């Protein structure tokens, strides 16, 4: 592992029984194989990253929720009415969430490993959902279209940081751009355009992530 | 303040055991086969290292059945997670010291 070469001397320091007691000597004759230590740290980081990615196939919820948000926009553009929109949100949202939970469970079963119930990504996801709902309830006027989208962008960026996933980070930036575009241009159906932008961003991120997985 | 070299733990400071703890800090549980495949080890080699970690209280092992198939589940204990963190911190500090001492 970490290799140390010492030009042995009959002094106190080299009599240490500690495996790495030699480090205590400030002699210029000590040579530490630094690259080996660095490689060890990198190996550990690589293992942790690959385990994290294996247990968090984020591309799947990206595709699922991407399609869900695109569907949300279509319901508005097709003028199917408030009841249909509400039914779509409840049924579509529940179905999408159910599919994601089932997929994660199947992945864990196939791998033979389970992610922590309250790991960082789950907590970020919960905060994201609560934040988006709160922004929907609290925002008024035009802000009700882009405020939840900004919250969604922040949550997606946070997920990208937690999972150290560049595709997710890019999706977060794309969603922030969508929110800004909606805020600046104020289109006729701002909520629908925001949902369409979010949906396309997530769908693309999901497809790219699936290719890379 | 102790020299970082003195904080390196013989039990943890071993490539395979570091690998086991690294995987188990990201997964709440992992079964024997997952660890074996992820770390590219033989059954015997992995068993031996898990036993060392279990004896040190760094991992918890549970044996059971899943659809009549015998399975061994391994989990890092709180002490195991802390030990990995301390090990990486000590290694990082050692590297920094060497870098600082370099002409």
Image: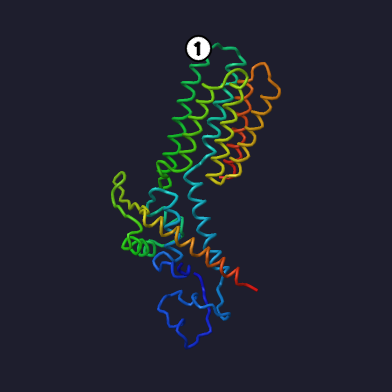
Which chain does tag 1 point to? Answer: A
State the image coordinates of residue A82 (x, y, percent, origin top left). Answer: 53, 12
Location of the C terminus of chain A (image quadrant): top right
Q: How far across and down, in percent of the image, does residue A89 sit? A: 50, 21
Residue A183 lies, in percent from the top left, at 67, 24
Residue bearing the label numbered 1: A83
The way the protein has been coloured in the rendering is rainbow
Count of residue discs? 1
The quadrant in which residue B87 appears is bottom left
Q: Quadrant of residue B95?
A: bottom right
Residue drawn at x 53%, y 45% is A163
Q: Secondary structure at mark 1?
A: helix
User: Residue A135 appears at what percent x and percent y?
Assistant: 54, 25
Work out whether A24 lies above or below A86: below
Task: Locate residue A52 relative to residue A174 in the image: left or right.
Answer: left
Question: Would residue B81 be found to the left or right of residue B97 on screen?
Answer: left
Q: Is residue B95 above or below residue A91?
A: below
Q: Is residue A173 above or below residue A145?
A: below
Q: Residues within 10 Å of mark 1 (few under 14, many from 20)?
A: few
**Residue at the outermost bottom position:** A10
- Name which residue lies at 42% across and 43% down: A108
Front-most of residues A181 and A101: A181
Q: Residue at x 58, y 39 (%)?
A: A157
- Identify whether B61 is placed above or below A141: below
Most extreme residue toward the right, as rendered? Answer: A185
């Amino acid at each position: 592992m970490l290799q140390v070469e010492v030009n042995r001397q009959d002094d106190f320091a080299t009599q240490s029984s500690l495996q790495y007691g030699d480090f205590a000597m400030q002699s210029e004759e000590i040579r530490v194989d630094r690259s080996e230590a660095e490689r060890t740290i990198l190996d550990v980081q690589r293992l942790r990253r690959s385990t994290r990615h294996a247990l968090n196939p984020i591309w799947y919820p990206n595709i699922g929720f991407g399609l869900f948000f695109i569907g949300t926009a279509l319901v508005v553009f097709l003028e199917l009415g408030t009841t249909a929109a509400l039914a779509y949100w409840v049924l579509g949202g529940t179905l999408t969430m159910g599919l994601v939970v089932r997929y994660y469970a199947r992945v864990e079963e196939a791998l033979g490993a389970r992610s922590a119930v309250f790991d960082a990504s789950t907590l970020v996801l919960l905060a994201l959902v609560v934040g988006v709902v709160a922004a929907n309830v609290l925002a008024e006027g035009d802000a009700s279209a882009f405020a939840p989208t900004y919250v969604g962008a922040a949550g997606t960026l946070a997920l990208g940081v937690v999972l150290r996933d560049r595709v997710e980070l890019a999706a977060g930036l794309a969603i922030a751009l969508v929110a800004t575009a909606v805020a600046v241009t104020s289109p006729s159906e701002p909520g629908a355009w925001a949902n369409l932008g979010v949906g396309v961003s997530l769908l693309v991120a999901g497809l790219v992530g699936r290719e890379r997985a | 303040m102790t020299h970082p070299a003195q904080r390196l733990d013989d039990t943890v400071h071993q490539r395979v055991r570091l690998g086991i703890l690294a995987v188990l800090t990201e997964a709440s549980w992992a079964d024997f086969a997952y660890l074996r495949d992820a770390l590219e080890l033989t059954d015997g080699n992995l068993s031996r290292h898990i036993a060392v970690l279990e004896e040190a209280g760094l991992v918890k092992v549970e044996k059971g059945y899943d659809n009549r198939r015998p399975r061994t589940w391994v989990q890092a204990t709180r002490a195991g997670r802390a030990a990995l963190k301390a090990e990486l911190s000590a290694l990082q500090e050692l590297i920094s010291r060497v870098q600082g001492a370099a002409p």
